[in-house]
Amino acid sequence: MTPHAAPAADRVPLFAYGTLMHGHGNHALVESAVESVEPAVLPGAAMYDAGPYPYVLLGAAASVRGELVHLRADIHRTALAALDELEGYIGPKDPANDYERLMCTVLTDDGMNVRALVYVASAAVEPRVRQMPLVPRGDWDAHMAAQP
């Protein structure tokens, strides 16, 4: 899997794997922009626990479970701008990025390969992220449910 920088103008779905998923703290920020949601998996990625939210790193022999979120066409750009701010994404490969917004292929539960925007740990934070605990099975829902 080769990630590609994603142009903001494309109406591409978002792969949410942490606090943006339904039932989690930041979902309310995107809820009004959501057209539809379906379960999906990001292959070749690992999830790390940063406490209140996760990071994802690509290039792992694992996968991450999440949701493929289709944003409404009329507010797609506005929603992406708000998400970029939330995720600390300034622009492609900006050294101040907390996350990088990339285009990756995800697999839906019905077997479809779909190109989606994914916020992954930036190069600047990757060394710190690699020191964080791995999230078992790359499943934030299950991980959070298992917390005391």
Image (tube, rainbow, N blue to C red):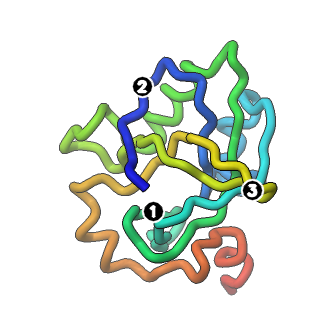
Q: Nearer the viewer, residue 148 or 116?
A: 116
Q: Position of residue 21 (x, y in %)?
A: 69, 52
Disc 2 residue type (three-letter): Pro
Q: Which residue is mark 3?
A: 111
Q: Which residue is mark 1?
A: 56
Disc 3 residue type (three-letter): Gly
Q: What secondary structure is marked by label 2?
A: loop
Q: Residues within 10 Å of mark 2 (few under 14, many from 20)?
A: few
Compared to residue 28, the image places residue 63 above or below, namely: below
Residue 57 falls in image quadrant: bottom left
| Residue drawn at 69 percent across, 13 percent down | 74
Q: Position of residue 140 (x, y in %)?
A: 63, 69
Q: Which residue is mark 2?
A: 7
Q: Position of residue 132 (x, y in %)?
A: 38, 78
Q: What secondary structure is marked by label 3?
A: loop
Q: Is residue 46 left or right of residue 29?
A: left
Q: Quadrant of the C terminus?
A: bottom right
| Residue drawn at 65 percent across, 17 percent down | 75
Residue projecting furthest to the top: 74
Give whichever of discs 2 and 1 has the lower sequence position. 2
Give whichever of discs 3 and 2 has the lower sequence position. 2
In space, the residues marked 2 and 1 are separated at their CA atoms by 20 Å
Q: What secondary structure is marked by label 1?
A: strand
Q: Position of residue 142 (x, y in %)?
A: 71, 76
Query: How many numbered circles are shown?
Result: 3
